[in-house]
Amino acid sequence: MAFSKFKLDGRVALITGASGLLGQEHASALLESGAKVVLTDISKKNLEIAKTKLSKLFHTEMIYTKIMDVTSKDAIIKVFQELINYGLRIDVLINNAAIDPKVDQENGLKEISRLENFDLDQWNLELNVGLTGAFLCSQVFGSQMATDGKGGVILNIASDLSVFSPDQRLYLRSDRPKSRQPVKPVTYSVVKTGLIGLTRYLATYWVDQGVRCNALSPGGVFNGQDEHFVKRVTNLIPLNRMADIDEYRSTVQFLCSDASSYMTGQNIIIDGGRSVW
C-alpha cells in the first residue's frame, strides 16, 4: 500500500533542460513510476538523442519532446497550448534548466569567470535561464494546476550550492597567480539560492488550490571528472565519494508523487553529507 503512493499512472510531467545529464535521470524516474513525460529543451538535436536513449528503456508513446526556450514566456505558452491540444494536462513540473559552467582542470575557466571581471551579459543569461525560466514555467503551468481544480506538483532542481558557498580551493592551480585562478562563477550559487526562495513562495501561494512545491539540492555527480578534482571534493564529503548518476531518482519519485503529499516548501539536500561538515 505504501509504495502505491509513488505511482504516477495517468499523470503528465514536464521537465525543462531535459536533455542534460540529470534531466534524463529525472525523466527515467518519472517514467518508471508510470507518468507520461514531456522533455523540453532548447536543442532539437539533444532532445532527439535523449528520447532515443529513454525509448530503449520505456515505451516511446510515453515520451514527448518539445523545443522550448524557458527565457521566453511566448515560447512557454506556445508549448502549453500545444499540449492542451494533445489532451495533455501538466500535473508535475520539474524546473531543471540551468547553465552550469564547468571548470576545466587543464585550462580552467577564463579570467572573465572571476567576480572582478564577470560580464553583465553572462550574468543576465544565466539568471534568465536558471531562475527567470523557473519563474515563467511556474507561472504558466502552475497557474493551470491552481485554476482547474486538480492541483499539481512543482519541483525546482537547486544544488548543494544553495546552502553553502563554492569551495574555490577545489580548482586551485599551482602554476597560476591568485588573480588568474579558475573559479566557479558567482551566477550558479545565486541562481540555485534564488530557486529556494522561489520554492518557498510557490509552496504557500497556491496551497489552497492543491499545488505543492519543493526543491531538490543534489551534490556533485561523478561523470569522469579529473581525478585530482574528484579526490579534493570527496575529501569534503563524509560518504567519501561523489553521487552516482541514478542516486537522485527515488527522491524525484517521492517529491513528485503522493508519497510526499504532506511536504511543501522544503529543500531536500542530498550531498553525501557534505553540508553537515
Image (cartoon, grey):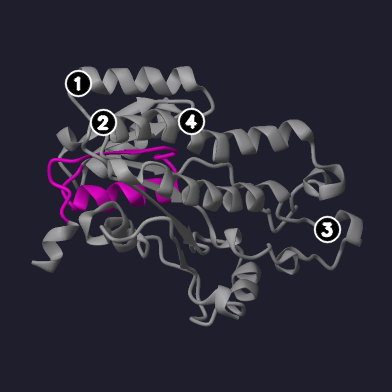
Q: Is residue 19 magenta?
A: yes
- The kind of residue on which mark 1 rests is Tyr
Give the left or right position of residue 264, taking residue 227 as reference: left
As helix, strand or loop, the secondary structure at mark 1 comes to loop
Please report the residue visible at 48 percent of the width from the left and 52 percent of the height from the top: 200
- Evaluate whether residue 260 shows in this view: yes
Give the left or right position of residue 48, taking residue 110 as reference: left
Query: Which residue in the structure is indicated by mark 4?
Result: 136
Q: Mark 2 or 4 closer to N-term?
A: 2
Query: Which residue in the structure is indicated by mark 2?
Result: 64
Where is residue 244? Give x, y as percent.
Answer: 41, 66
Which mark lies nearer to you, 1 or 4? 4
Within 10 Å of the Cα at label 1, are there few (<14), some (14-19), or many (20+) other Cα atoms?
Answer: few
**Which mark identifies residue 86?**
1
- Image quarter of residue 166: bottom right
Within 10 Å of the Cα at label 2, are there few (<14), some (14-19), or many (20+) other Cα atoms?
Answer: some
**Which mark identifies residue 104?**
none
Q: For the residues marked 1 and 3, what is the alpha-carbon distance in whole angstroms? A: 51 Å
Give the left or right position of residue 219, taking residue 260 as reference: right
Where is residue 189? Give x, y as percent.
Answer: 65, 53
- The kind of residue on which mark 4 rests is Leu
Which mark lies nearer to you, 3 or 4? 4
As helix, strand or loop, the secondary structure at mark 3 comes to loop
- Asked whether 184 or 207 is in front, the reply is 207
- The kind of residue on which mark 3 rests is Gln
Are the residues at dot 3 and dot 4 in contact (C-beta closer than 8 Å)?
Answer: no
Are the residues at dot 2 and dot 1 in contact (C-beta closer than 8 Å)?
Answer: yes
Which mark lies nearer to you, 2 or 1? 1
Please report the residue visible at 33 percent of the width from the left and 23 percent of the height from the top: 80
Q: Mark 1 or 4 closer to N-term?
A: 1
Q: Which residues are magenta?
A: 7-35
